[in-house]
Each structure stands twice: as C-alpha cells, then as structure tokens.
C-alpha cells in the first residue's frame, strides 16, 4: 500500500514521503499561479483552477487567495462558489455537492495528528525528518451555505440545505435543513417556509 493510499484511507502515513511531497509541490505551484492571476483574464484563472481541482463540475468560481493541500482529493459538484481566503486541506477526500456557497476565510481541514505525544514526535527515516499523521474525510452535501470564518474539522458531514453560521467550529455532523452555529457548532432550528423571501419581495424565477 502506497503512502498516498494510506493517507486517503485514514491510516497513519509518512507525511514527508517523496511522492506526497511532489504532489504537494505541484499543488502549491498551481495555487501560487492561481492567486497571482488577474481578474481581467478569467479564462486563464478558471483553467488553472480546473487543473488544481480536476474533480469539479460546471460553473466553479473561487476568489483568491485559496490554499489547498493536494487538490486531487477534492470532489466538487456544479455551481460552487468560495469567497476570499479559503483553505481546503484535502489530505483525506473532501466531497462537496451542488450549489454550495462558502464564505470568506473558511477552513475545511481533514488532517489529524495522533493524540499520544510520543506518536506525534518527528523522527528520522535515513536523513529525512518526518511524522506520522492521518486524516478524516469531510462531506458537504448539496445546497449548503457556510458563512465566513467557519472551521470544518475532519470526519464531519454537513447535510443537504444546512446553513453554518459565521465563526462556527464544526466538529460533529450537522443534519440536513438546519441552521447551525457556535463553538462547537450545534443545530439551532430547521430552515422553514417562513424563511422564504421571494414572495414578499415579488420575485419570480
């Protein structure tokens, strides 16, 4: 089993393995290129983004700056928007559905370090200093809105249509259709028909 396979399967893996290092360097170069691209050339910017996150659907729009760990472990549906300064640490797979909105300064973080202090310590393999780490996947289902400055931790699923309030830290699953917020993030109430705004403002689609 390769270190990449261990990593994406949630097993302890050698974090400075050469293959993983090369994959991270490739992603960082694309991130650097994307973040330096001009708003005046969206065609070029979108092409860089598609190379960085190849498993993505139609109409993906991301504001710079973005940070990702690998890019190749991110799976995004159609109509995705991420605002400024987003971070997706995709050590384990990150699955994002259709019509998802991500606010500014959101962190989606799959990496986990061992709880035992000895197991966290760096050690040498030959001349190379490394650590053992692992990761837990994250799933964000269709029609979710994640507001600004939210942190989503590994192992979490956010259900379809849920809303995560600004500044929340999501450490547990959030059920579909709920507004949730807080540190730690907890479901507060269902989003209901009383929350609809179109009819009151005479808007039709």
Image: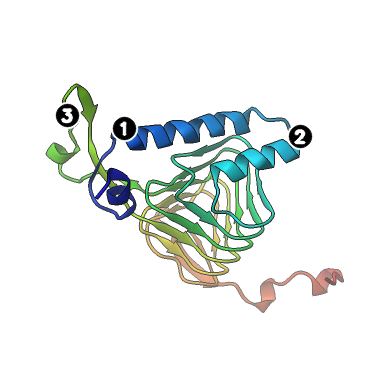
Q: Nearer the viewer, residue 124 or 180?
A: 124
- Residue at 81% over, 72% down: 200
Q: Secondary structure at mark 1?
A: helix
Q: Which tag, 3 or 1, sits closer to the chain's start?
A: 1
Residue 53, above or below 48: below
Q: Residue at x 45, y 61 (%)?
A: 139
- Measured in 3D between alpha carbons, the distance from the residue under mark 1 to the one under mark 2, in whole angstroms, is 34 Å
Residue 165 drawn at (x, y percent): 54, 56
Q: Is residue 175 left or right of residue 47?
A: left
Residue 41: which numbered mark, if any?
A: 2
Quarter of the figure that contains the C terminus: bottom right
User: Is residue 63 visible to the viewer in this orientation of the structure?
Assistant: no
Q: Which mark is residue 18?
A: 1
**x%, y% of residue 64?**
62, 36
Q: Which of the two discs, 1 and 2, labels the residue nearer the N terminus?
A: 1
Q: Quadrant of residue 129?
A: top left
Query: Which residue occupies the foreground of this view, 77 or 100?
Result: 77
Where in the figure is residue 26, as x and y percent of width and height? 47, 33
Residue at horizontal 28 percent and vertical 35 percent from the top: 17
Q: Earlier in the sequence, mark 2 or mark 3?
A: 2
Residue that extends furthest to the left in the rendered view of this protein: 118
Under circle 2, the secondary element is loop
Residue 58 is drawn in which quadrant? bottom right
């Amino acid at each position: 089993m390769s270190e990449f396979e261990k990593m994406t399967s949630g097993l302890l893996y050698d974090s400075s393995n050469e293959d993983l290092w090369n994959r991270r360097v490739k992603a960082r170069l694309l991130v650097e290129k994307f973040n330096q691209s001009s708003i005046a050339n969206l065609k070029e910017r979108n092409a860089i983004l598609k190379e960085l996150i190849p498993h993505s659907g139609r109409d993906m729009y991301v504001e710079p700056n973005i940070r990702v760990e690998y890019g190749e472990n991110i799976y995004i549906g159609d109509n995705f928007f991420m605002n400024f300064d987003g971070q997706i640490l995709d050590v384990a797979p990150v699955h994002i559905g259709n019509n998802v909105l991500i606010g500014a300064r959101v962190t989606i973080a799959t990496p986990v370090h061992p709880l035992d202090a000895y197991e966290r310590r760096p050690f040498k393999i030959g001349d190379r200093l490394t650590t053992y780490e692992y990761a837990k996947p994250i799933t964000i289902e269709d029609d979710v809105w994640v507001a600004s400055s939210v942190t989503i931790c590994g192992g979490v699923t956010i259900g379809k249509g849920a809303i995560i309030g600004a500044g929340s830290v999501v450490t547990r699953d959030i059920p579909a259709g709920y507004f949730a917020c807080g540190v730690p993030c907890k479901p507060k109430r269902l989003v209901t028909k009383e929350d609809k705004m179109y009819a009151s403002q005479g808007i039709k689609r």
